[in-house]
Amino acid sequence: MAGAPDGGTVLSEKMLAARFAEVVLPHLGDALSLARWLTGNQVDAEDVVQEACLKAHAGIAGFVGGNPRAWLLTIVRNASYTWMARNRPRSVIAVGDLADLDDVSPPPDNDADSPEAVLIAKANSAAVEAAIARLPQAFRETVVLRDINGLSYREIATMLGVPQGTVMSRLARARGLLMTELGGRHEPA
């Protein structure tokens, strides 16, 4: 490697690698989850996260602190949209990967571990995921970032480049649409 005879370049690369491991690696699960929600399936999400990690590695020296999770998820979001614009025709609509439900749904309680209760819980989880997938893009993105990834309103606003009030109104509208859709499916015909 070219660099100072005292190993300055190598030390710098080691420091960057350590910083990447500290800032990015703990949040890869969240990055993959967000990419799955945005792209609609696991395989595409893995491609997006790989691209996002390359971008994060290239830009790790520019990370000046703050919330590393929000920083990485911003990169993943941008990489997702770039990847989808490059690899998908505009007429394709992503709907989510039902395999994600196994990771998201909590284990049944001891009192409710009957096969019927498990089946009902899976059906409810599938209905929620399908309802989220049908939300308009801006609403779906806001719900996933807030309710699934747990980002603050301020972090989401910064990530999306919109005012905090817009995040709050999108979240309220999205939750209202979800309640209407999910509440309506239990009413008698």
Image (cartoon, rainbow, N blue to C red):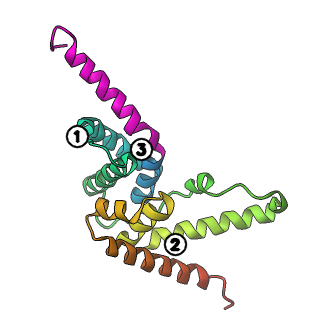
Q: Residue 16 at what x, y percent from top left?
A: 29, 28
- Is residue 16 among the parts visible in the rendering? yes
Compare marks 3 and 1 and give the one earlier in the sequence: 3
The label on residue 74 is none
Q: Nearer the viewer, mark 2 or mark 1?
A: 1
Compare marks 2 and 3 and give the one earlier in the sequence: 3
Q: Is residue 95 left or right of residue 159?
A: right
Which residue has dot 1 on it?
62
**Magenta part, dominant SS:** helix
Which structural element holds mark 1? helix
- Is residue 136 among the parts visible in the rendering? no
Q: Which is more toward the observer, 27 or 40? A: 27
Give the spatial CA distance, label 2 vs label 1.
38 Å
Which residue has dot 3 on it?
46
Which residue has dot 2 on it?
131
Q: Residue at (52%, 72%) from the top-left corner?
A: 131
Above or below for 183 versus 17: below
Query: Which quadrant would residue 123 be assigned to in this image?
Result: bottom right
Give the spatial CA distance, label 2 vs label 3.
23 Å
